[in-house]
Image (spheres, helix red, strand yellow):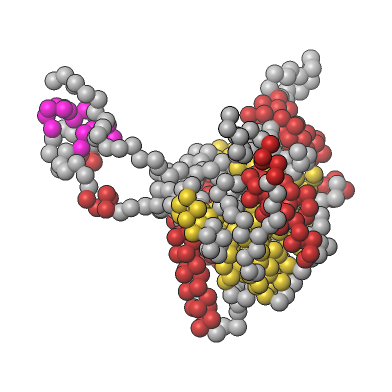
């Protein structure tokens, strides 16, 4: 039988103006993994539309001695999500008398995001830290839980500005090794190079994106036993750790332009 | 065979979808057109009686907040003696823009909460930080039910020598800063407040704070068509919450005479 009308239900109902439960609060986050460290960074501006709501709203959070989570997107969902992740991690520690491993946190986050598949948390998550084998790792997620381990990832308002830069500088895309030189291997850069790439990414994003700026927070997670003189000399603050001989986390703060 | 579990056990309409090949969400509903239960629940779709901007700043002795006394009904200045500032316990003050009935509901909610806290006699008193987080959870829970409380709220307070100001809105969005403004104030007053306050949070005197707040309320009255030249200034300091009487600003309108379309010119 031929269909005379489209099948969309009840055309005679008045159109209702629907409440939009989401907002977009700007800002950008970024993480880069090294061989035995991981850098997780975010700016501190929070916006709605063309207004700056505050110049200091942290987007990067320490979860355990070896895991740091950066969140970006809709602020209310972000803070709810971080709160719930922290709670699950605390429960894990009470249940198992150890801190949750990074890859376990990553899988837990995918479960928590997918659990709200049909009313998603509007959050882009990047998890960084040290894996159980001592390697630096970055896990990136989409709002409904798809995730993968990568060498680097940018997300948020200026992700489209920063990610191509990282593809070039971290993954060596469109670069060719000098004749006779060893092939490029992503995820192997020294810490000072990584930190300057992070700082350059954010200063450039601040220049070109109105929702990025004010302040930069970089969390550096360092594998046990690794030399930390480099990061300490940059004026980093060390966060207290539960296990004295394990991984260490440092925070580096820089100003970004406020205009 | 109908492969869509959601349509199993429902009468099939051979006139429309003979072989049940259309995905469920594109399919015409059979049975009654309107679901009596979902249609019976009315959620807030828009604010009705509304308040406009609220301002808050930190200064040397604590925090200062201001809001005018108007509750509008659309463009009608409907209620002109409303207080949009409300104290919660002895350390905290909240100010509300947006729907006034939702605000009154929140006032009752917080009053009940404070009574419950008082009767528990556990030696703890809720401060501005606790009230702020409580409110943000209430607002976020309601937006998640798609039934928001249509307000932008400022929470201010002073406890244990620390000042606090924070913002919460109908989406559950939160933030803190040394100066805050909701509604039109975010566009008009916030730049003036930031210029006056940023970097001077711990040195600015009460007189200076009052002067900049009054200046902002005057500018808002000039520019915001939903405002009223009758407003309250409140402080929270070591001495507790003090909500002042309604006051007004000196205004100057003589310039309007010379502007075509503003005064009484006829062409």
Residue B92 at x, y percent in the picture: 62, 69
Against A239, is A222 above or below?
A: above
Residue displayed at 18% across by 30% down: B20
Residue displayed at 76% across by 59% down: B211
Q: Quadrant of residue B14?
A: top left
Residue B211 placement, left or right of B220: right
Query: Magenta region's main secondary structure?
Result: loop
Residue A187 placement, left or right of B54: right
Task: Give the quadrant of the C terminus of chain B.
Answer: top right
Res. A178 in view: yes
Residue B38 placement, left or right of A143: left
Residue displayed at 25% across by 25% down: A6
The magenta stretch is: B13-29
Which residue is more in the foreground, A214 or B220?
A: B220
Against B257, is B160 above or below?
A: below
Residue displayed at 40% across by 42% down: A18
Is A28 inside the magenta-drawn segment? no
Task: Give the quadrant of the N terminus of chain B.
Answer: top left
Against B230, is A187 above or below?
A: above
Residue B168 at x, y percent in the picture: 57, 56
Residue A153 at x, y percent in the picture: 64, 35
Which residue is more in the foreground, A10 or A185?
A: A10
Which residue is more in the foreground, A137 or B109?
A: B109
Residue A243 at x, y percent in the picture: 70, 62
Furthest residue toward right? A233
Q: How many marks?
A: 0
């Amino acid at each position: 039988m031929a269909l005379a009308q489209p099948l969309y239900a009840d055309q005679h109902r008045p159109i209702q103006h629907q409440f939009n439960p989401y907002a977009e609060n700007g800002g950008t986050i970024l993480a880069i993994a090294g061989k035995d460290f991981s850098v997780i960074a975010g700016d501190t501006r929070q916006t709605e539309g063309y207004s700056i709501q505050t110049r200091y709203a942290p987007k990067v959070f320490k979860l355990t001695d070896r895991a740091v989570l950066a969140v970006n997107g809709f602020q209310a969902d972000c803070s709810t999500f971080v709160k719930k992740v922290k709670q699950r991690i605390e429960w894990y520690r009470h249940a198992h008398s150890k801190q949750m491993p990074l890859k376990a946190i990553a899988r837990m986050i995918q479960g928590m995001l997918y659990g709200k598949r049909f009313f998603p948390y509007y959050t882009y998550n990047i998890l960084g830290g040290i894996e159980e084998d001592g390697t630096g790792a970055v896990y990136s997620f989409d709002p409904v839980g798809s995730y993968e381990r990568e060498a680097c990832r940018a997300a948020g308002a200026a992700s489209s500005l920063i990610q191509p830069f990282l593809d070039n500088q971290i993954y060596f895309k469109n670069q060719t090794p000098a004749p006779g030189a060893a092939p490029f291997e992503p995820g192997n850069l020294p810490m000072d190079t990584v930190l300057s790439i992070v700082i350059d990414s954010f200063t450039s994003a601040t220049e070109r994106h109105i929702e990025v700026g004010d302040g930069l927070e970089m969390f550096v997670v360092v594998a046990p036993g690794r030399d930390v003189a480099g990061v300490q000399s940059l004026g980093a603050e060390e966060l207290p750790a539960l296990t004295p001989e394990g991984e260490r986390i440092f925070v580096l703060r820089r100003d970004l332009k406020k205009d | 065979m109908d492969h869509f579990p959601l349509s199993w056990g429902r009468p099939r309409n051979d006139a429309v979808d003979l072989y049940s090949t259309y995905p469920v969400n594109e399919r015409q509903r059979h049975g009654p057109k309107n679901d009596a239960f979902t249609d019976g629940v009315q959620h807030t779709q828009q604010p009705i009686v509304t308040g406009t901007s609220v301002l808050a700043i930190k200064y040397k002795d604590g925090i200062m907040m201001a809001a005018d006394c108007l509750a509008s009904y659309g463009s009608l200045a409907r209620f002109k003696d409303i207080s949009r500032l409300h104290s919660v316990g002895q350390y905290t003050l909240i100010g509300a823009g947006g729907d006034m009935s939702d605000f009154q509901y929140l006032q009752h909610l917080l009053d009940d909460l404070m009574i419950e806290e008082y009767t528990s006699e556990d030696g703890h008193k809720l401060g501005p930080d606790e009230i702020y987080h409580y409110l943000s959870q209430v607002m976020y829970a309601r937006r998640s039910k798609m039934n928001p409380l249509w307000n932008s709220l400022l929470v201010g307070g002073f406890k244990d020598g620390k000042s606090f100001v924070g913002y919460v809105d109908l989406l559950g969005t939160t933030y803190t800063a040394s100066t805050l403004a909701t509604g039109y104030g975010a566009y008009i007053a916030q730049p003036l407040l930031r210029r006056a306050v940023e970097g001077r949070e711990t040195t600015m005197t009460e007189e200076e704070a009052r002067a900049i707040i009054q200046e902002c309320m005057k500018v808002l009255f000039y520019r915001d068509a939903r405002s009223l030249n009758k407003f309250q200034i409140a402080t929270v300091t070591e001495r507790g919450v003090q909500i002042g009487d309604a006051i007004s600003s000196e205004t100057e309108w003589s310039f309007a005479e010379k502007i075509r379309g503003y005064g009484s010119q006829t062409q």
